[in-house]
Amino acid sequence: MRYDAEKSQQLVLIFEEFMRATLLSTLTTLTVTIAALVSPGLHASGMGKVDLVVITKSESSMALLRDGKILKQYRIAMGDLPAGHKLKEGDQRTPQGRYTLDYKKPDSAYYKSIHISYPNEEDKLRAKALGIRPGGMIMIHGQNPKSPLPPEQAQQYNWTDGCIAITNAEMDEVWKVVDEGTPIEIWP
């Protein structure tokens, strides 16, 4: 009987997290949409540093914000199974939640990359409760150097192992305006 009670509690926690993420995702998407209407057409060149990066997985979109205003948006590629929160290593999903862009890697296998602080404490606790490994090494990075497709065409497909990919030219823009320590919110 104890086993069933523990599993039931785990399911309740996962459901509560899903509902919280859904509400926050809706509010974030609304904020990002309103900000885009207020400040369209701004470019990365000369935009200054950003204070928040927002990923909206359902829209394959990454927005760079400062003071609640969108400065630039990008089309992103993600893992092969983008729907849902990353639960375990190798599940091809991009995590959801609030993280930090905690370090930059100029010599990445995918041009340049910026590390996302996944897994956070909540992710680690969930994985432990489920008896699985949460995975890690989730990055925002450039193109796959082995892809035969031109960058813009490659961005039409989800091809990463759970990372967030943009073109190399876009990565150069993001590299300049995102400092280590910048928060990132990843929504469904």
Image: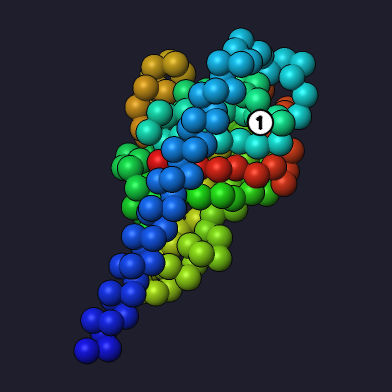
**Residue 36 position (above or below residue 118):** above
Horizontal and vertical percent position of residue 181: 72, 46
Q: Position of residue 19 (x, y in %)?
A: 38, 53
Q: Residue furthest top?
A: 41
Image quarter for residue 38? top right
Give the colouring mode of the picture.
rainbow
Instruction: Please tell me whether mark 1 sits on a helix, a strand or a loop.
Output: loop
- Is 188 located above or below residue 75 in the figure? below
Give, as a three-letter code, the residue at label 1: Gly
User: Mark 1 sits on what residue?
Assistant: 68
Image location (x, y in percent) of residue 14: 36, 62
Residue 35 shown left or right of residue 177 in the figure: left
Between 85 and 67, the one nearer to me in the picture: 67
| The C terminus, quarter of image | top left
Res 57 seen here: yes
Q: Nearer the viewer, residue 79 or 68?
A: 68
Name the residue furthest bottom: 1
Identify the residue at horizontal 40%, vertical 46% (top origin).
22
Q: In which image quadrant can residue 160 be found?
A: top left
Q: How many marks?
A: 1
Query: Which image quadrant for residue 174?
Result: top right
Residue 33 in picture, x, y percent from top left? 51, 24
Toward the viewer: 130 or 6?
6
Q: Residue at x 44, y 62 (%)?
A: 134
* Left or right side of 107 for 3: left
Left or right side of 6 for 170: right
Depth check: give the residue in front, 119 or 30. 30
Look at 44% across and 38% down and name the residue there: 26
Could you tell me if residue 89 is visible in this image?
Answer: no
Task: Name the quarter where the N terminus is drawn.
Answer: bottom left
